[in-house]
């Protein structure tokens, strides 16, 4: 009896009705590569912005906004940003690649230092800016250094 009932239901669209195409949300833009890892020494890990796991870092590994990099005791790494800025991570450090909102004509590097020490170099301070945020302060460097 159930088979008969199901068989009698009409399937599909009436002849004068057209099927409605599914609505798809616009695709999110691909993440923008901000930097890459170089000069890895010891145990260095990366946590992707969209992930929950700490992955083993690899030489040349790309870094994107909101990724995190962690070094343990005795480890170190160099982060080379697309604009030529270089940040050297000491041991027992934890940093995040911050979202960057550059001004026209200015190349900016933004990172958050959650733990440890970083040393930074800018290739061209006249056109580059480096912003380092910590839980307690923000330091910006370019032509001038500003402590907040």
Image (cartoon, rainbow, N blue to C red):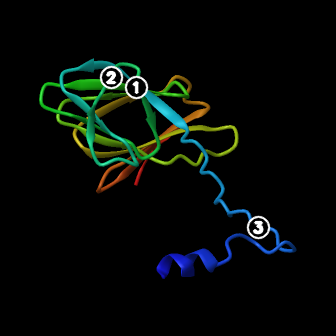
Q: Residue at x 71, y 69 (%)?
A: 12
Which residue corresponds to mark 3?
19
**Of labels 3 and 2, the one closer to you:** 3
Above or below 55: residue 12 = below
Q: Nearer the viewer, residue 120 or 13?
A: 13
State the separation of the CA atoms marked 3 and 2.
49 Å
Residue lying farthest left? Answer: 73
Which residue corresponds to mark 1?
61
User: Left or right: 118 with respect to 148?
Assistant: left
Q: What secondary structure is found at the residue carrying circle 2?
A: loop
Q: In the rendered structure, which disc, 1 or 3, sits on the residue that comes first in sequence?
A: 3
Please provide percent x and percent y for residue 54.
26, 40
Please provide percent x and percent y for residue 18.
82, 68
User: Left or right: 22 with respect to 68?
Assistant: right
- The answer to whether the residue labelled 2 contacts the one labelled 1, judged by CB atoms less than 8 Å apart, is yes
- The answer to whether the residue labelled 1 contacts the one labelled 3, judged by CB atoms less than 8 Å apart, is no
Q: Residues within 10 Å of mark 2 (few under 14, many from 20)?
A: some
Please provide percent x and percent y for residue 58.
33, 22
State the separation of the CA atoms marked 2 and 1.
5 Å
Which residue corresponds to mark 2?
58
């Amino acid at each position: 009896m159930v088979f008969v009932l199901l068989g009698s239901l009409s399937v599909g669209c009436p002849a004068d009705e057209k099927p409605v195409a599914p609505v798809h949300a616009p695709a999110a833009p691909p993440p923008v590569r901000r930097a890459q890892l170089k000069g890895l020494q010891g145990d260095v890990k990366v946590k992707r912005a969209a992930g929950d796991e700490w992955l083993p870092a690899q030489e040349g590994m790309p870094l994107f906004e909101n990724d995190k990099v962690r070094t343990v005791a005795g480890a170190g790494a160099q982060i080379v940003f697309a604009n030529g800025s270089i940040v050297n991570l000491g041991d027992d450090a934890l940093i995040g690649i911050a979202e960057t909102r550059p001004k026209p004509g200015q190349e900016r590097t933004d990172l958050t230092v959650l733990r440890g020490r970083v040393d930074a170099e800018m290739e061209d301070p006249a056109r580059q800016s480096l912003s380092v945020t910590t839980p307690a302060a923000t330091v910006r460097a370019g032509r001038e250094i500003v402590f907040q």
